[in-house]
Image (cartoon, rainbow, N blue to C red):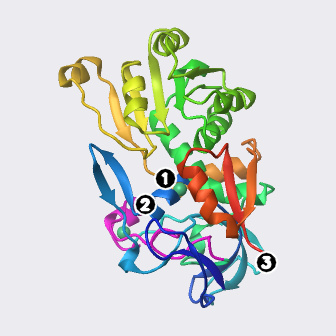
Amino acid sequence: MKAYQVIENGKPLEERILETPEAKGREVVLKTVACGVCHSDVHIHDGYFELGGGVQLPSPLPGGEPLTMGHEIFGEVAAIGEEVEGINIGERYVAYPWMGCGDCDLCDDDMTHYCANNSNLGIHVGGGYGDHVLVPDQKYLFHAADTPDSLAGSYACRGLTAYSALKKAGPYKKDNSLVIVSAGGLGVLALKIAQAAYGINPIVVDIDDEKLGMARQLGASATINSSEEGAAEKLMELTEGGARSIVDFVGAEASVNFGYNLLARGGSYVIVGLFGGQISLPLPLQALTEKKLMGSYVGSLGDMAELMELVVAGKIDPVAVETRDVSEANNTLLEMKEGKLLGLVALTHDQ
Ligand SMILES: [Zn+2]
Ligand SMILES: [Zn+2]
């Protein structure tokens, strides 16, 4: 099999020929059809996350070994283990990539994504920048019905992340009860999921007018450019005195400082994005306003099942995805790092 691998953090990915995996037990080998390029790929490739104040959280290559990234995998079944049931060669599935050890309390409680010994596809073990992926258990596979090939894999990370974060920040009674920060790929997926799961058209905040225009086309009830003067007043007005729920897919000092102060009493602020930085909060106000500040990291296998039920039922409008050949992985990562990508990009392999 062929894979584009990170050999050294920050250096261009290299094309390598590897042994094609075989399936045993409950394992399934997928031949990659398309794999979304997620912003966390940029951090995995760089080898660190920015924590602010010049501090970095390292994310070194597992075991210092070359890594085939790509955790938004949609593929065709190429091989199945002898214990696999109900899954057949040639069928196409999305793979849930957030694998746990399968043997701890967290894994037992549908929190494999929190497991300390996880082996996530495309992060710890080979992913969809390779033309074959070994999925360790058939329970991680989901149908995507007639979802476009290029979009399906993105439900396993960005879609799931959006779904799980929205679940934490609810309930939502009307359009202005939810503010989504980011009109990028994740933000527009969240917009579509909010429409499908909660029947609301949220407010979208970003600093890029072109991206905000796209969010309005996709049904955002209002958009705000937070870098413009009067943005805070506009948000207060639109939310009738403060936001009930803000889901922040940027997670930068500037976005959190902007949004957290505009939260209504008892409101929820969910940080999803990993842009980086630090904030300081006056603690008495935290008590007096009962604001909730929390994080959200991908989503559980149970969340994935709920999300894919909405997808299969055709309730989520597909967003457009640009496809590129996997050989364009390097410039795609660079463009994503520089914030130049409008919407989602998926890498495809020669079929
Ligand atoms: Zn991701
Ligand atoms: Zn575990």
How far, Cα to Cα, is label 3 from label 1?
28 Å
Dot 2: what SS? helix
Q: Earlier in the sequence, mark 3 or mark 1?
A: 3
The x and y percentages for residue 130 are 63, 76
Dot 3: what SS? loop
Front residue (pair 24, 285): 285
> At x 46% / y 43%, what residue is drawn?
273
- The range drawn in magenta is 101-130
Q: Which residue is mark 2?
A: 113
> At x 75% / y 29%, what residue is drawn?
217
> At x 35% / y 49%, what residue is drawn?
50
The x and y percentages for residue 20 are 63, 88
The x and y percentages for residue 341 are 64, 46
Q: Is residue 54 left or right of residue 229?
A: left
How far, Cα to Cα, is label 1 from label 2?
7 Å
Q: Earlier in the sequence, mark 1 or mark 2?
A: 2
Front residue (pair 3, 285): 3
The x and y percentages for residue 344 are 67, 49
| Crowd rating for badge 1 (residues with CA inside 10 Å; few <14, some 14–19, many 20+) | many
Q: Tell whether circle 1 marks a residue whose Cβ is less than 8 angstroms from ligand 1.
A: no
Q: Is residue 93 left or right of residue 8?
A: right
Main secondary structure along the magenta-highlighted residues: loop
Q: Is residue 183 above or below residue 28?
A: above
Q: Is residue 287 above or below residue 21?
A: above
Q: Which residue is mark 1?
A: 299
Dot 1: what SS? loop
Asked whether the residues under the numbered discs 1 and 2 touch, taking CB atoms below 8 Å apart as contact, a structural biologist would say yes
The quadrant in which residue 117 appears is: bottom left
Q: Tell whether circle 2 marks a residue whose Cβ is less than 8 angstroms from ligand 2.
A: no
Q: Tell whether circle 3 marks a residue whose Cβ is less than 8 angstroms from ligand 1.
A: no
The quadrant in which residue 74 appears is: bottom right
Q: Which residue is mark 3?
A: 90
